[in-house]
Amino acid sequence: MTENEIIERALKILEDRLRYEVNVTLDSPRAVKEYCRLRFAECESEVFSVLWLDNRHRLIECDEMFNGTIDGASVYPREVAKRALQHNAAACILTHNHPSGIPEPSQADRRITERLIEALKLFEIRVLDHIIVGHNECVSFAERGLV
């Protein structure tokens, strides 16, 4: 079994636990960062994803919504809102990777986060965090007081 196959199996186990175990929630930035780092750190291009949560912050689904290039991805709030309603989500966590390996938020990252917060607020869906994944570390907007 290759390393990638082992990581894929570990992610599947983790996602199953997050979805089906009653008392497992994604309500700490540390837990979310660990999950996102495992899932997205090795992506070669930028991937913008949303972790959809129920009203108890249990994982409904992790959607890889937009794929980009080595230095950006176009994100469309309309599509994010549409997917939120399809999942009947109560909350969400935004996440994307920086293929450069440096997870420092850009101005564009801050702007899209603000736009998505405003768009989802219309449907009473809370944005709990935005996690940016680098190679060895992640940055949480919630921990920095940006959401």
Image: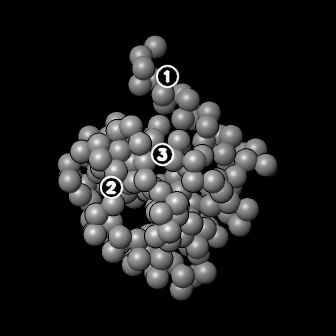
Judged left or right of residue 70, residue 4 is: right
Closer-to-camera residue (69/110): 110
What secondary structure is marked by label 2? loop
Q: Residue at position x 54%, y 28% from top?
A: 9
Q: Residue at position x 35%, y 70% from top?
A: 110
Residue holding disc 2? 104
Judged left or right of residue 109, residue 142 is: right
Q: Which mark is residue 36?
A: 3
Residue kind at label 2, given as amino acid type: Glu
Residue kind at label 1, given as amino acid type: Ile
Of badges 1 and 3, the one in the foreground is: 3
What secondary structure is marked by label 3? helix
Q: Is residue 102 above or below residue 91?
A: above
| Residue sticking out furthest to the bottom | 122
Q: Residue at position x 33%, y 66% from top?
A: 109
Q: Which mark is residue 20?
A: none
Of badges 3 and 2, the one in the foreground is: 2
| Residue sticking out furthest to the top | 1
Q: Residue at position x 68%, y 60% from top?
A: 57
Q: CA distance from mark 3 to mark 2?
A: 15 Å
**Mark 1 nearby-residue class (10 Å; few <14, some 14–19, many ≥20):** few
Tag 2 near tag 1, CB within 8 Å? no
Residue holding disc 1? 6
What secondary structure is marked by label 1? helix
Spot occupied by residue 111 in the image (x, y as percentages of width and height): 33, 74
